[in-house]
Amino acid sequence: MNGTDDIFKGDILIENDRIQAIGPDLNPVNITKIIDGRGKTIIPGFVQTHIHLCQTVFRGRADDLELLDWLKKRIWPLEAAHDEESLYYSALLGIGELIQSGTTAIVDMETVHHTDFAFQAIASSGIRALSGKVMMDKGEEVPKKLQENTNQSIQESVDLLEKWHNFDNGRIKYAFSPRFVVSCTEPLLKEVAELSASYHVNVHTHASENLGEIQIVEGETGMKNIEYLDHLGLANNRLILAHCVWLNEREKQIIKEKGIHVSHCPGSNLKLASGIAEIPSLLDDDISVSLGADGAPCNNNLDMFNEMRLAALIQKPKHGPTTMDAKTVLKMATIGGAKAIGLGNEIGSIEVGKKADLVILNLNDFHTYPSFDVDPISRIVYSATRADVETSIINGKIVMENRIMKTMDKKIVLAESNHSIKRMTERMATIESF
Protein backbone atom coordinates (compact mmCIF):
# COMPACT_ATOMS: atom_id res chain seq x y z
CA MET A 1 0.00 0.00 0.00
CA ASN A 2 2.91 2.39 -0.57
CA GLY A 3 2.88 5.17 -3.14
CA THR A 4 3.88 2.85 -5.99
CA ASP A 5 1.64 -0.06 -4.94
CA ASP A 6 4.59 -2.44 -4.64
CA ILE A 7 4.01 -6.11 -3.97
CA PHE A 8 7.21 -7.88 -2.97
CA LYS A 9 8.58 -11.17 -1.69
CA GLY A 10 11.19 -10.89 1.01
CA ASP A 11 11.94 -10.12 4.62
CA ILE A 12 10.84 -7.38 7.00
CA LEU A 13 13.09 -6.27 9.85
CA ILE A 14 11.36 -4.72 12.87
CA GLU A 15 13.36 -2.86 15.49
CA ASN A 16 11.47 -1.53 18.52
CA ASP A 17 8.23 -0.13 17.08
CA ARG A 18 9.30 0.52 13.49
CA ILE A 19 10.13 -1.20 10.22
CA GLN A 20 13.88 -0.86 9.80
CA ALA A 21 14.47 -2.73 6.55
CA ILE A 22 12.64 -4.51 3.73
CA GLY A 23 14.27 -6.69 1.13
CA PRO A 24 15.11 -10.14 -0.15
CA ASP A 25 17.17 -12.35 2.16
CA LEU A 26 17.93 -9.83 4.88
CA ASN A 27 20.59 -11.14 7.22
CA PRO A 28 20.76 -8.77 10.21
CA VAL A 29 22.64 -9.55 13.39
CA ASN A 30 21.42 -9.69 16.99
CA ILE A 31 17.91 -10.88 16.11
CA THR A 32 15.79 -11.78 19.14
CA LYS A 33 12.87 -13.39 17.27
CA ILE A 34 12.23 -14.74 13.79
CA ILE A 35 8.70 -15.28 12.48
CA ASP A 36 8.70 -17.75 9.61
CA GLY A 37 6.50 -16.10 7.01
CA ARG A 38 7.25 -18.38 4.08
CA GLY A 39 4.12 -18.92 2.02
CA LYS A 40 2.22 -16.29 4.01
CA THR A 41 0.78 -12.91 3.00
CA ILE A 42 1.75 -9.81 4.99
CA ILE A 43 -0.43 -6.71 4.89
CA PRO A 44 -0.55 -3.40 6.76
CA GLY A 45 -2.92 -3.72 9.70
CA PHE A 46 -6.44 -2.53 8.97
CA VAL A 47 -7.45 0.92 10.23
CA GLN A 48 -11.16 1.09 11.14
CA THR A 49 -12.34 4.68 11.41
CA HIS A 50 -15.67 4.15 13.17
CA ILE A 51 -16.13 1.76 16.12
CA HIS A 52 -18.12 1.76 19.38
CA LEU A 53 -16.27 -0.48 21.85
CA CYS A 54 -18.79 0.41 24.55
CA GLN A 55 -21.49 -1.38 22.56
CA THR A 56 -19.79 -4.75 22.03
CA VAL A 57 -21.63 -6.43 24.91
CA PHE A 58 -24.93 -5.35 23.32
CA ARG A 59 -24.39 -7.69 20.37
CA GLY A 60 -27.63 -9.39 19.37
CA ARG A 61 -29.85 -7.11 21.50
CA ALA A 62 -30.84 -4.46 18.97
CA ASP A 63 -31.54 -6.30 15.74
CA ASP A 64 -33.94 -5.34 12.95
CA LEU A 65 -34.59 -1.70 13.85
CA GLU A 66 -33.99 1.60 12.06
CA LEU A 67 -31.52 4.06 13.55
CA LEU A 68 -33.63 6.28 15.81
CA ASP A 69 -35.70 3.38 17.20
CA TRP A 70 -32.47 1.40 17.59
CA LEU A 71 -31.00 4.21 19.68
CA LYS A 72 -34.05 5.11 21.77
CA LYS A 73 -35.42 1.62 22.42
CA ARG A 74 -32.21 -0.37 22.81
CA ILE A 75 -28.83 1.35 22.68
CA TRP A 76 -29.33 4.39 24.89
CA PRO A 77 -30.96 2.39 27.72
CA LEU A 78 -28.16 -0.16 27.53
CA GLU A 79 -25.44 2.51 27.52
CA ALA A 80 -27.13 4.09 30.57
CA ALA A 81 -26.85 0.74 32.37
CA HIS A 82 -23.07 0.49 31.96
CA ASP A 83 -20.79 0.41 34.98
CA GLU A 84 -17.01 0.65 35.11
CA GLU A 85 -16.43 -3.09 34.84
CA SER A 86 -18.96 -3.69 32.07
CA LEU A 87 -17.42 -0.93 29.96
CA TYR A 88 -13.92 -2.35 30.50
CA TYR A 89 -14.89 -5.83 29.37
CA SER A 90 -17.05 -4.55 26.51
CA ALA A 91 -13.98 -2.74 25.22
CA LEU A 92 -11.74 -5.80 25.62
CA LEU A 93 -14.31 -8.02 23.89
CA GLY A 94 -14.38 -5.69 20.91
CA ILE A 95 -10.62 -5.27 20.80
CA GLY A 96 -10.09 -9.03 20.90
CA GLU A 97 -12.37 -9.44 17.91
CA LEU A 98 -10.70 -6.58 16.05
CA ILE A 99 -7.18 -7.90 16.58
CA GLN A 100 -8.20 -11.43 15.62
CA SER A 101 -9.64 -10.09 12.36
CA GLY A 102 -6.59 -8.03 11.39
CA THR A 103 -7.48 -4.56 12.65
CA THR A 104 -4.59 -2.80 14.36
CA ALA A 105 -5.93 0.77 14.68
CA ILE A 106 -9.40 2.18 15.40
CA VAL A 107 -11.36 5.39 15.77
CA ASP A 108 -13.61 4.64 18.74
CA MET A 109 -16.57 6.48 20.28
CA GLU A 110 -17.41 5.58 23.87
CA THR A 111 -20.51 6.33 25.97
CA VAL A 112 -21.18 9.18 28.42
CA HIS A 113 -19.75 7.67 31.62
CA HIS A 114 -16.80 5.50 32.76
CA THR A 115 -14.72 6.26 29.64
CA ASP A 116 -11.48 6.03 31.62
CA PHE A 117 -12.06 2.27 31.93
CA ALA A 118 -12.35 1.89 28.17
CA PHE A 119 -9.03 3.70 27.84
CA GLN A 120 -7.53 1.30 30.39
CA ALA A 121 -8.67 -1.63 28.22
CA ILE A 122 -7.23 0.03 25.11
CA ALA A 123 -3.94 0.66 26.91
CA SER A 124 -3.52 -2.92 28.16
CA SER A 125 -4.57 -4.57 24.88
CA GLY A 126 -1.90 -2.94 22.74
CA ILE A 127 -4.27 -1.74 20.01
CA ARG A 128 -3.72 1.66 18.41
CA ALA A 129 -6.69 3.91 19.03
CA LEU A 130 -8.16 7.35 18.62
CA SER A 131 -10.97 7.44 21.17
CA GLY A 132 -13.16 9.76 23.17
CA LYS A 133 -16.07 10.09 25.55
CA VAL A 134 -19.39 10.60 23.80
CA MET A 135 -21.00 14.00 24.41
CA MET A 136 -24.81 14.35 24.75
CA ASP A 137 -26.35 17.48 26.26
CA LYS A 138 -29.77 17.46 24.56
CA GLY A 139 -32.30 15.23 22.84
CA GLU A 140 -35.70 13.60 23.25
CA GLU A 141 -36.20 10.20 24.90
CA VAL A 142 -32.65 10.20 26.24
CA PRO A 143 -32.30 8.19 29.48
CA LYS A 144 -31.64 10.33 32.54
CA LYS A 145 -28.22 8.76 33.07
CA LEU A 146 -27.10 9.92 29.63
CA GLN A 147 -28.36 13.50 29.96
CA GLU A 148 -25.36 15.76 30.44
CA ASN A 149 -24.74 19.28 31.56
CA THR A 150 -22.93 21.11 28.76
CA ASN A 151 -20.06 22.41 30.86
CA GLN A 152 -19.61 19.10 32.66
CA SER A 153 -19.51 17.19 29.38
CA ILE A 154 -16.83 19.51 28.05
CA GLN A 155 -14.77 19.41 31.25
CA GLU A 156 -14.84 15.61 31.46
CA SER A 157 -13.74 15.41 27.83
CA VAL A 158 -10.83 17.78 28.42
CA ASP A 159 -9.78 15.87 31.54
CA LEU A 160 -9.70 12.60 29.58
CA LEU A 161 -7.79 14.25 26.75
CA GLU A 162 -5.14 15.58 29.09
CA LYS A 163 -4.76 12.16 30.72
CA TRP A 164 -4.73 9.89 27.66
CA HIS A 165 -3.78 11.88 24.55
CA ASN A 166 -0.41 10.61 23.20
CA PHE A 167 -0.25 7.80 25.78
CA ASP A 168 2.45 5.18 25.00
CA ASN A 169 4.37 7.42 22.63
CA GLY A 170 1.25 8.30 20.66
CA ARG A 171 -0.33 4.85 20.37
CA ILE A 172 -3.45 6.27 22.02
CA LYS A 173 -4.86 9.64 20.98
CA TYR A 174 -7.97 11.54 22.04
CA ALA A 175 -10.83 12.74 19.83
CA PHE A 176 -13.72 14.93 20.93
CA SER A 177 -16.82 12.83 20.25
CA PRO A 178 -20.15 14.68 20.15
CA ARG A 179 -22.65 11.95 19.30
CA PHE A 180 -24.44 13.77 16.49
CA VAL A 181 -26.20 17.10 15.99
CA VAL A 182 -29.46 15.64 17.34
CA SER A 183 -27.78 15.01 20.74
CA CYS A 184 -25.73 18.19 21.07
CA THR A 185 -26.48 21.86 21.72
CA GLU A 186 -24.93 24.57 19.63
CA PRO A 187 -22.81 25.90 22.54
CA LEU A 188 -21.31 22.44 23.04
CA LEU A 189 -20.49 21.98 19.36
CA LYS A 190 -18.97 25.47 19.11
CA GLU A 191 -16.78 24.79 22.14
CA VAL A 192 -15.70 21.45 20.66
CA ALA A 193 -14.64 23.27 17.48
CA GLU A 194 -12.51 25.69 19.51
CA LEU A 195 -11.00 22.98 21.71
CA SER A 196 -10.16 20.81 18.70
CA ALA A 197 -8.24 23.73 17.19
CA SER A 198 -6.57 24.59 20.50
CA TYR A 199 -5.41 21.05 21.27
CA HIS A 200 -4.91 20.05 17.60
CA VAL A 201 -6.99 16.90 18.02
CA ASN A 202 -9.67 15.22 15.93
CA VAL A 203 -13.42 15.47 16.23
CA HIS A 204 -15.35 12.24 15.58
CA THR A 205 -19.12 12.30 15.09
CA HIS A 206 -22.02 10.88 13.07
CA ALA A 207 -23.64 12.78 10.21
CA SER A 208 -26.31 12.24 7.57
CA GLU A 209 -26.76 8.57 8.40
CA ASN A 210 -30.56 8.43 8.38
CA LEU A 211 -33.34 10.45 6.73
CA GLY A 212 -35.18 10.89 10.03
CA GLU A 213 -32.04 12.30 11.64
CA ILE A 214 -31.58 14.76 8.76
CA GLN A 215 -35.19 15.90 9.08
CA ILE A 216 -34.68 16.65 12.79
CA VAL A 217 -31.47 18.59 12.13
CA GLU A 218 -33.00 20.62 9.32
CA GLY A 219 -36.08 21.34 11.41
CA GLU A 220 -33.99 22.62 14.31
CA THR A 221 -31.27 24.49 12.43
CA GLY A 222 -32.67 25.24 8.99
CA MET A 223 -29.57 23.60 7.51
CA LYS A 224 -28.37 20.21 6.35
CA ASN A 225 -25.96 18.35 8.63
CA ILE A 226 -22.70 19.26 6.89
CA GLU A 227 -23.77 22.85 6.30
CA TYR A 228 -24.54 23.21 10.00
CA LEU A 229 -21.20 21.70 11.07
CA ASP A 230 -19.47 24.10 8.69
CA HIS A 231 -21.49 27.01 10.12
CA LEU A 232 -20.18 26.09 13.61
CA GLY A 233 -16.54 25.95 12.53
CA LEU A 234 -16.20 22.17 12.74
CA ALA A 235 -15.63 21.54 9.03
CA ASN A 236 -11.88 21.00 8.62
CA ASN A 237 -9.35 18.21 8.14
CA ARG A 238 -9.55 17.19 11.82
CA LEU A 239 -13.20 16.15 11.40
CA ILE A 240 -14.07 12.46 10.92
CA LEU A 241 -17.70 11.89 9.92
CA ALA A 242 -19.25 8.45 10.17
CA HIS A 243 -21.73 7.38 7.46
CA CYS A 244 -22.59 10.39 5.22
CA VAL A 245 -25.21 8.30 3.43
CA TRP A 246 -27.46 11.20 2.44
CA LEU A 247 -25.55 14.20 1.11
CA ASN A 248 -26.54 16.93 -1.31
CA GLU A 249 -24.09 18.51 -3.74
CA ARG A 250 -23.39 21.48 -1.47
CA GLU A 251 -22.49 19.15 1.40
CA LYS A 252 -20.15 17.15 -0.84
CA GLN A 253 -18.50 20.42 -1.88
CA ILE A 254 -17.95 21.40 1.77
CA ILE A 255 -16.50 17.99 2.58
CA LYS A 256 -14.07 18.27 -0.33
CA GLU A 257 -13.08 21.90 0.20
CA LYS A 258 -12.58 21.55 3.95
CA GLY A 259 -10.75 18.20 3.82
CA ILE A 260 -13.28 16.35 5.99
CA HIS A 261 -12.79 12.59 6.31
CA VAL A 262 -15.70 10.22 5.67
CA SER A 263 -15.93 6.84 7.40
CA HIS A 264 -18.00 4.46 5.28
CA CYS A 265 -19.82 1.75 7.27
CA PRO A 266 -21.61 -0.43 4.70
CA GLY A 267 -22.57 -3.27 7.05
CA SER A 268 -24.19 -0.98 9.58
CA ASN A 269 -25.91 1.12 6.90
CA LEU A 270 -27.47 -1.98 5.38
CA LYS A 271 -28.57 -3.56 8.66
CA LEU A 272 -30.21 -0.37 9.98
CA ALA A 273 -31.75 0.22 6.53
CA SER A 274 -30.11 3.65 6.44
CA GLY A 275 -29.16 3.45 2.78
CA ILE A 276 -26.11 3.09 0.56
CA ALA A 277 -23.62 5.95 0.59
CA GLU A 278 -22.52 7.32 -2.79
CA ILE A 279 -18.90 6.36 -2.22
CA PRO A 280 -17.82 6.23 -5.89
CA SER A 281 -18.75 9.88 -6.39
CA LEU A 282 -16.91 10.88 -3.20
CA LEU A 283 -13.79 9.05 -4.39
CA ASP A 284 -14.11 10.64 -7.84
CA ASP A 285 -13.98 14.01 -6.05
CA ASP A 286 -10.79 12.96 -4.20
CA ILE A 287 -12.59 12.98 -0.85
CA SER A 288 -10.93 11.02 1.94
CA VAL A 289 -12.95 7.83 2.49
CA SER A 290 -12.08 5.00 4.86
CA LEU A 291 -13.97 2.06 6.38
CA GLY A 292 -15.47 1.11 9.73
CA ALA A 293 -17.72 -1.61 11.08
CA ASP A 294 -19.56 0.67 13.53
CA GLY A 295 -20.76 -1.18 16.65
CA ALA A 296 -21.49 -4.84 17.35
CA PRO A 297 -25.27 -4.35 17.81
CA CYS A 298 -25.73 -2.84 14.33
CA ASN A 299 -23.48 -5.09 12.28
CA ASN A 300 -23.11 -7.62 14.17
CA ASN A 301 -19.36 -8.09 13.84
CA LEU A 302 -16.29 -5.88 13.67
CA ASP A 303 -14.69 -7.66 10.72
CA MET A 304 -12.89 -5.52 8.13
CA PHE A 305 -12.94 -8.36 5.60
CA ASN A 306 -16.74 -8.18 5.71
CA GLU A 307 -16.72 -4.39 5.31
CA MET A 308 -14.29 -4.52 2.38
CA ARG A 309 -16.38 -7.09 0.55
CA LEU A 310 -19.61 -5.16 1.15
CA ALA A 311 -18.02 -1.84 0.18
CA ALA A 312 -16.98 -3.34 -3.14
CA LEU A 313 -20.14 -5.27 -3.98
CA ILE A 314 -23.00 -2.96 -3.03
CA GLN A 315 -21.94 -0.30 -5.56
CA LYS A 316 -21.58 -2.60 -8.58
CA PRO A 317 -25.28 -3.10 -9.49
CA LYS A 318 -25.69 0.68 -9.87
CA HIS A 319 -22.25 1.80 -11.05
CA GLY A 320 -20.94 -1.25 -12.92
CA PRO A 321 -18.56 -4.14 -12.20
CA THR A 322 -15.36 -2.09 -12.41
CA THR A 323 -16.51 0.29 -9.67
CA MET A 324 -14.83 -0.11 -6.26
CA ASP A 325 -12.17 -2.54 -7.43
CA ALA A 326 -10.19 -4.58 -4.91
CA LYS A 327 -7.19 -2.24 -4.81
CA THR A 328 -9.37 0.80 -4.11
CA VAL A 329 -11.12 -0.98 -1.27
CA LEU A 330 -7.92 -2.30 0.33
CA LYS A 331 -6.50 1.22 0.24
CA MET A 332 -9.60 2.49 2.05
CA ALA A 333 -9.07 -0.20 4.71
CA THR A 334 -5.38 0.60 5.27
CA ILE A 335 -3.64 3.76 4.08
CA GLY A 336 -6.97 5.57 3.66
CA GLY A 337 -7.78 5.03 7.33
CA ALA A 338 -4.27 6.04 8.34
CA LYS A 339 -4.56 9.34 6.48
CA ALA A 340 -7.97 10.01 8.03
CA ILE A 341 -6.49 9.98 11.52
CA GLY A 342 -3.44 12.01 10.55
CA LEU A 343 -1.08 9.03 10.59
CA GLY A 344 -0.52 8.55 6.88
CA ASN A 345 3.22 8.95 7.41
CA GLU A 346 3.25 6.50 10.33
CA ILE A 347 1.01 3.53 9.51
CA GLY A 348 -1.18 2.10 6.72
CA SER A 349 1.55 0.73 4.44
CA ILE A 350 4.62 -1.48 4.66
CA GLU A 351 7.50 0.98 4.31
CA VAL A 352 10.84 1.52 5.98
CA GLY A 353 10.51 3.99 8.83
CA LYS A 354 6.83 3.40 9.43
CA LYS A 355 5.38 1.91 12.59
CA ALA A 356 5.31 -1.88 12.59
CA ASP A 357 1.54 -2.42 12.46
CA LEU A 358 1.41 -5.62 10.43
CA VAL A 359 -0.87 -8.61 9.94
CA ILE A 360 0.17 -12.05 8.73
CA LEU A 361 -2.43 -13.94 6.70
CA ASN A 362 -2.30 -17.63 5.94
CA LEU A 363 -4.12 -17.94 2.63
CA ASN A 364 -3.20 -21.58 2.07
CA ASP A 365 -6.71 -23.00 2.20
CA PHE A 366 -9.56 -24.20 0.02
CA HIS A 367 -11.42 -20.87 -0.10
CA THR A 368 -8.37 -18.89 -1.27
CA TYR A 369 -6.99 -21.29 -3.90
CA PRO A 370 -5.78 -21.57 -6.57
CA SER A 371 -3.09 -19.01 -5.93
CA PHE A 372 -1.20 -19.38 -9.20
CA ASP A 373 -1.13 -16.12 -11.15
CA VAL A 374 -3.98 -14.63 -9.08
CA ASP A 375 -3.83 -10.99 -7.96
CA PRO A 376 -3.00 -11.15 -4.23
CA ILE A 377 -5.14 -8.08 -3.54
CA SER A 378 -8.13 -9.81 -5.10
CA ARG A 379 -7.51 -12.81 -2.83
CA ILE A 380 -7.51 -10.55 0.25
CA VAL A 381 -10.61 -8.51 -0.59
CA TYR A 382 -12.84 -11.09 -2.26
CA SER A 383 -11.75 -14.47 -0.85
CA ALA A 384 -10.01 -14.11 2.53
CA THR A 385 -11.81 -14.13 5.87
CA ARG A 386 -10.88 -13.10 9.40
CA ALA A 387 -10.12 -16.74 10.18
CA ASP A 388 -7.10 -16.38 7.87
CA VAL A 389 -5.45 -13.86 10.21
CA GLU A 390 -2.62 -15.73 11.88
CA THR A 391 -0.54 -13.08 13.65
CA SER A 392 -1.08 -9.41 14.45
CA ILE A 393 1.72 -6.96 15.30
CA ILE A 394 1.00 -3.46 16.64
CA ASN A 395 3.67 -0.88 17.40
CA GLY A 396 6.29 -3.59 16.92
CA LYS A 397 4.72 -5.87 19.55
CA ILE A 398 3.10 -9.20 18.82
CA VAL A 399 -0.42 -8.97 20.22
CA MET A 400 -1.65 -12.20 18.64
CA GLU A 401 0.48 -15.10 17.42
CA ASN A 402 -0.87 -18.21 15.71
CA ARG A 403 -4.41 -17.08 16.69
CA ILE A 404 -3.49 -16.89 20.39
CA MET A 405 -4.04 -13.52 22.08
CA LYS A 406 -0.99 -12.24 23.94
CA THR A 407 -2.39 -9.20 25.74
CA MET A 408 -5.60 -10.55 27.24
CA ASP A 409 -7.03 -13.78 28.64
CA LYS A 410 -9.74 -14.81 26.19
CA LYS A 411 -11.60 -17.04 28.66
CA ILE A 412 -11.81 -14.27 31.24
CA VAL A 413 -12.99 -11.69 28.69
CA LEU A 414 -15.74 -13.98 27.38
CA ALA A 415 -16.91 -14.93 30.87
CA GLU A 416 -16.88 -11.37 32.16
CA SER A 417 -18.74 -10.14 29.08
CA ASN A 418 -21.58 -12.50 29.93
CA HIS A 419 -21.50 -11.46 33.58
CA SER A 420 -21.54 -7.80 32.56
CA ILE A 421 -24.55 -7.92 30.25
CA LYS A 422 -26.45 -10.04 32.78
CA ARG A 423 -25.79 -7.45 35.47
CA MET A 424 -26.76 -4.61 33.12
CA THR A 425 -30.07 -6.14 32.06
CA GLU A 426 -30.94 -6.87 35.69
CA ARG A 427 -30.19 -3.25 36.54
CA MET A 428 -32.42 -2.05 33.69
CA ALA A 429 -35.27 -4.22 34.99
CA THR A 430 -35.08 -2.89 38.55
CA ILE A 431 -34.61 0.80 37.83
CA GLU A 432 -37.76 2.40 36.47
CA SER A 433 -36.11 5.11 34.41
CA PHE A 434 -32.60 5.55 33.13
Image (cartoon, rainbow, N blue to C red):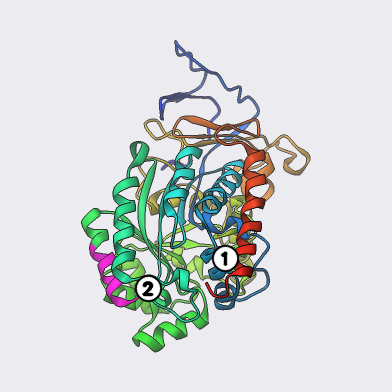
- Check the image and report above or below for 166 versus 262: above
Describe residue 265's horizontal placement relative to residue 338 as left or right: right
Instruction: State which quadrant residue 157 falls in.
Output: bottom left
Q: Residue at x 36, y 68 (%)?
A: 255
Q: Residue at x 58, y 60 (%)?
A: 311
In the picture of the structure, the residue carrying the numbered disc 2 is 137
- Check the image and report above or below for 418 versus 251: above
Residue 353 coordinates in the image, percent (x, y): 37, 31
- Check the image and report above or below for 9 versus 320: above
Residue 62 coordinates in the image, percent (x, y): 64, 68
* Type of amino acid under label 1: Leu
Mark 1 burial class by Cα count in 10 Å: few <14, some 14-19, many 20+: many
Kindly state the secondary structure of the residue where label 1 is placed.
helix
Q: Please, which residue is most extreme toward the left here?
A: 198
- Between 364 and 114, the one lying in front of the other is 114
Mark 2 burial class by Cα count in 10 Å: few <14, some 14-19, many 20+: many
- Between 257 and 226, the one lying in front of the other is 226
- Between 410 and 218, the one lying in front of the other is 410
In the picture of the structure, the residue carrying the numbered disc 1 is 78
* Type of amino acid under label 2: Asp
The secondary structure that most of the magenta stretch takes on is helix
Kindly state the secondary structure of the residue where label 2 is placed.
loop
Q: Are marks 2 and 1 in contact (CB under 8 Å)?
A: no
Provide the residue span drawn in magenta.
184-194
Residue 97 coordinates in the image, percent (x, y): 61, 46
- Whether residue 189 is in magenta: the answer is yes
Q: Is residue 321 visible?
A: no
Describe residue 289's horizontal placement relative to residue 380 as left or right: left
Instruction: State which quadrant residue 392 falls in.
Output: top right
